């Protein structure tokens, strides 16, 4: 029996799902809703911006964005299979996992050039 | 309250029929009659040519699995009273498996998958004759639910991945592999992991979960397979570490 390399994508999927479950709601509140709810959105931006100056905070932020991206890509990839929407593996894999990788790289670029 | 119910049975007699066809039977319906009772009534009183498989009548032997109104069911554990409203029961052989005759599905492929994962205790050393492999209640609880499988193959009829790719080991085989891997008395997980690690092992499962819904013994194969994915994931990491250290593929 040939060993599957699915554990790589499944690990990213699992890690992303776990992160989303634990801190997804908090992330939405802090990055989206608070800006609408607080009296001084600019002060909030400044607070978040200063927090992001620390490399560890940037890494953590990258993790909470990139891992859920892989989680989503993995679920969509296998969801298409379940819906009998088939295509070449390299194409679908490229679109979903490649898309998650490209968006993660873009996110990393923005975070580390802030 | 009607005291009869209609069964629409999918017949297939390979020596006579070029394709399956439907035959309707009207059978008595009482609160204590199971679908198996109805099939036996047909066989005994209406049509002795009908073929169906059964043995224990008490959800232990796992022989009498059929599709009832499109759902995989043990016919001995499914009661006519629950279908009075519908008026008609459609009964056919289990989905995703070849049909031998009428309601008899060929489960030999499933049995081969189950045998492949070596579902028995593997020991490299035997204990002295006067001792036993002792096990705490906590150690037993790790695998006990998975050991309730009766090999009825309802989970294979429910599994869309097995339906599309019969090479997929499927819910029962993967659950039994986990059952023995989690047993503190077993020493054979290294012989089962290559089956779990393969694409046709745990990684063909997309966690649809219908196997666990239809399981008549509440075994929860979907949970077993997901735990198998964690085990295979760890195994992949350990193997990668071995390869990086210049050792062979485990």
Image (cartoon, coloured by chain):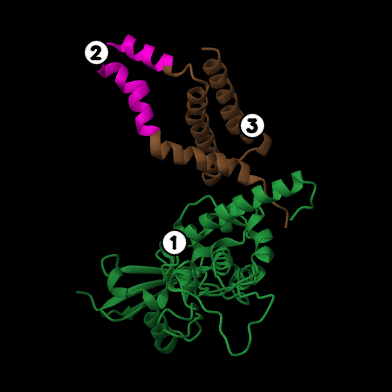
Q: Position of residue A91 (x, y in %)?
A: 65, 33
Residue at 45 percent across and 41 percent down: it is A18
User: On the image, numbered disc 3 is attached to which residue?
Assistant: A94
Is circle 1 on the same chain as circle 2?
no
Secondary structure category for the residue under label 3: helix
Disc 1 from disc 3: Cα separation: 33 Å
* Dot in front, 1 or 2: 2
Residue A26: in magenta span: yes
Task: Please provide percent x and percent y for residue B108.
Answer: 63, 73
Q: What residue does disc 1 label?
A: B212
Chain shown brown: that is A
Q: Give the chain letter at badge 3.
A: A
Q: Tell me whether marks 1 and 3 sit on the same chain.
A: no
Q: In the rendered image, what is the letter of the chain coloured green?
A: B
In the rendering, which numbered label is found on residue A62?
A: none
Point out residue B26 in the picture as x, y percentages from the top left corner: 34, 77
- From which residue to which does the magenta span run? A24-50
Disc 1 crowd rating (10 Å Cα; few below 14, some 14-19, many 20+) is: many
Task: Compute the Cα span from label 1 to label 2.
Answer: 50 Å
Chain letter of the residue carrying label 2: A
Quadrant in the picture for residue B172 = bottom right
Q: Residue at x 60, y 24 (%)?
A: A102
Residue reaching furthest left? Answer: B1
Q: Which mark is residue A39?
A: 2
């Amino acid at each position: 029996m040939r060993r599957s390399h699915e554990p790589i994508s499944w690990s990213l999927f699992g890690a992303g799902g776990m992160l989303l479950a634990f801190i997804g709601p908090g992330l939405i509140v802090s990055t989206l809703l608070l800006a609408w709810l607080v009296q001084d959105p600019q002060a909030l931006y400044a607070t978040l911006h200063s927090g992001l100056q620390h490399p560890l905070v940037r890494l953590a932020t990258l993790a909470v964005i990139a891992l859920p991206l892989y989680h989503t890509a993995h679920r969509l990839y296998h969801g298409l299979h379940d819906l009998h929407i088939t295509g070449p593996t390299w194409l679908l894999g490229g679109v979903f996992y490649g898309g998650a990788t490209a968006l993660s790289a873009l996110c990393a670029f923005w975070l580390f050039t802030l | 309250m009607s005291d009869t119910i209609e069964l629409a049975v999918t017949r297939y007699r390979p020596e006579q029929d070029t394709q399956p066809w439907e035959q309707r039977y009207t059978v008595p319906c009482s609160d204590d009659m199971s679908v198996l009772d109805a099939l036996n009534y047909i066989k005994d009183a209406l049509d002795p040519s009908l073929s169906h498989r059964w043995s224990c009548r008490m959800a232990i032997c796992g022989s009498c699995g059929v599709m009832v109104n499109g759902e995989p069911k043990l016919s001995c554990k499914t009661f006519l009273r629950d279908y009075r409203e519908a008026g008609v029961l459609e009964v056919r052989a289990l989905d995703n498996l070849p049909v031998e005759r009428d309601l008899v599905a060929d489960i030999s492929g499933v049995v081969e998958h189950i045998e492949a994962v070596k579902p028995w205790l593997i020991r490299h050393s035997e204990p002295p004759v006067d001792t036993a492999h002792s096990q705490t209640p906590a150690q037993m609880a790790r695998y006990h639910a998975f050991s309730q499988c009766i090999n009825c193959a309802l989970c294979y009829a429910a599994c869309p991945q097995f339906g599309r790719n019969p090479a997929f080991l499927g819910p029962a085989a993967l659950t039994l592999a986990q059952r023995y891997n989690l047993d503190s008395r077993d020493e054979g997980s290294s012989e089962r992991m290559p089956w779990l690690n393969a694409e046709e092992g745990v990684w063909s499962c997309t966690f649809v979960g219908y196997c666990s819904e239809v399981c008549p013994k509440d075994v929860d194969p979907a949970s077993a397979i997901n735990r198998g994915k964690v085990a295979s994931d760890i195994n992949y990491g350990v193997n990668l570490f071995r390869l990086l250290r210049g050792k062979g593929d485990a």
